Image (cartoon, helix red, strand yellow):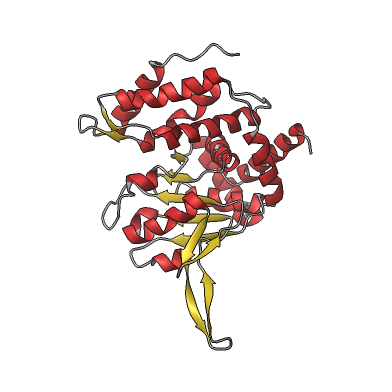
């Protein structure tokens, strides 16, 4: 399969999922960029806008095994990582795998779990494996976590720690649909179109091969310098108490390569970095108390981005 065929297959995924998720092509493309870059996604939005529907539709279109856990305070770490149980037939302990051992793990309302349960995801997200009773078990590949959290209704929630926020390659918000898109969504629902009607159009093996193609995209030193200068700017700004980490610059590079690949290029341009910058960086920053609301923070981040000169590469 050549590169143009691979891009066509990704576009077929976008069309297939778009039959259920109406008017959110940019969000869908960015989620797929994280899939191609090998990262995890945090979907932060109000209930009912289609976060879980998007995740399930993608799993079906890509032929991925998925597990979904609705997080509540009584979900235990062992529910995620698995546990050992005594097998009376063999008189040995047998590993019962947890929900995280799948290709796509959907963590619904992750912020409603206890901090211990939240941290149970960290090893799997970072290392691609879990450890139970001193035994290590690898998660299947590809492995992607899509976690959702609702910013409203804070009672009974546990804010994700900085270390866990930094492990999400992207934070995205779907938002309300446009008027006409919501009407079209209702029409399709009446015609019986749902996640169950989404067909598989790509295999997990194809996805892994396409990941390698995207990872092979070339990045000039000038663009690497641009990415580092952007991250450094967040570290120097007085409004930010904790800037973007080196993990952030690595993530921004990988996402930019995926964005370039999806446009049929084998090299990264500054506009690829711009397309994904805010979604990759904003959730990793700790802001001073002078900027309490998200609108002020978004404006400040745009100001920081605009203050860093992009290289002249076309």
Q: What residue appears at the point 63 percent right and 26 percent down from the top-left corner?
A: 218
| Residue 81 locus on image (x, y percent) | 47, 64
The residue furthest right is: 1
Quadrant placement of the C terminus = top right
Q: In this rendering, is residue 13 above or below 154?
A: above
Q: Is residue 12 left or right of residue 135?
A: right
Query: Can see residue 163?
Result: yes
Residue 174 visible in image = no
Q: Picture quarter containing residue 72?
A: bottom left
For the residue pair 14 and 147, the one nearer the viewer reads as 147
Residue 294: image x %, image y %?
31, 33
x, y (%) of residue 32? 58, 40
Q: Residue furthest left?
A: 289
From the viewer's perspective, is 121 left or right of 242?
right
- Against 86, residue 159 (above or below) is above
Q: How many marks?
A: 0
Q: Is residue 265 above or below residue 148?
A: above
- The quarter of the rendered structure image containing the N terminus is top right
Which residue does the image show at 20% across and 33% down from the upper left? 289
174, 8: nearer the viewer: 8
> Nearest the camera: 130 or 18?
130
Outermost residue toward the top? 312
**Percent x, y of residue 298:** 35, 28
Residue 55's place in the image compared with 99, above or below, is above
- Residue at 56% across / 39% down in the picture? 28
Residue at the far front in the pictured view: 134
């Amino acid at each position: 399969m050549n590169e143009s065929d691979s891009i066509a297959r990704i576009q077929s995924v976008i069309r297939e999922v778009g039959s259920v998720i109406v008017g959110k092509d940019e969000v869908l493309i960015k989620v797929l960029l994280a899939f191609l870059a090998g990262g995890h996604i945090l979907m932060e939005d109000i209930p009912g806008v289609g976060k879980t529907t998007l995740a399930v539709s993608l799993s079906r279109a890509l032929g991925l095994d998925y597990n979904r856990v609705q997080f509540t305070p009584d979900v235990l770490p062992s529910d995620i990582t698995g546990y050992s149980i005594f097998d009376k037939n063999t008189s040995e302990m047998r590993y019962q795998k947890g929900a995280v051992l799948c290709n796509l793990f959907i963590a619904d309302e992750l912020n409603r779990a206890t901090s211990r349960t939240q941290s149970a995801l960290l090893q799997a997200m970072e290392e691609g494996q879990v450890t139970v009773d001193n035994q290590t078990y690898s998660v299947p590949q590809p492995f992607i976590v899509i976690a959702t959290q609702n910013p409203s209704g804070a009672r009974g929630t546990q804010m994700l720690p900085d270390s866990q926020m930094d492990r999400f390659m992207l934070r995205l918000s779907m938002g309300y649909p446009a008027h006409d898109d919501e009407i079209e969504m209702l029409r399709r629902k009446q015609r019986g179109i749902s996640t169950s009607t989404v067909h598989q159009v790509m295999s997990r093996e194809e996805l892994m091969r396409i990941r390698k193609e995207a990872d092979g995209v070339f990045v000039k030193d000038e663009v690497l310098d641009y990415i580092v200068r952007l991250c450094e700017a967040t570290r120097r700004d007085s409004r930010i108490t904790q800037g973007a980490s080196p993990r952030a610059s690595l993530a921004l590079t990988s996402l930019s390569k995926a964005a370039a690949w999806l446009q049929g290029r084998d090299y990264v341009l500054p506009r690829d970095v711009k397309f994904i910058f805010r979604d990759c960086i904003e959730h990793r920053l700790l802001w001073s108390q002078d900027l309490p609301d998200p609108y002020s923070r978004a404006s400040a981040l745009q100001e920081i981005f605009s203050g860093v000169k992009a290289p002249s590469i076309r």
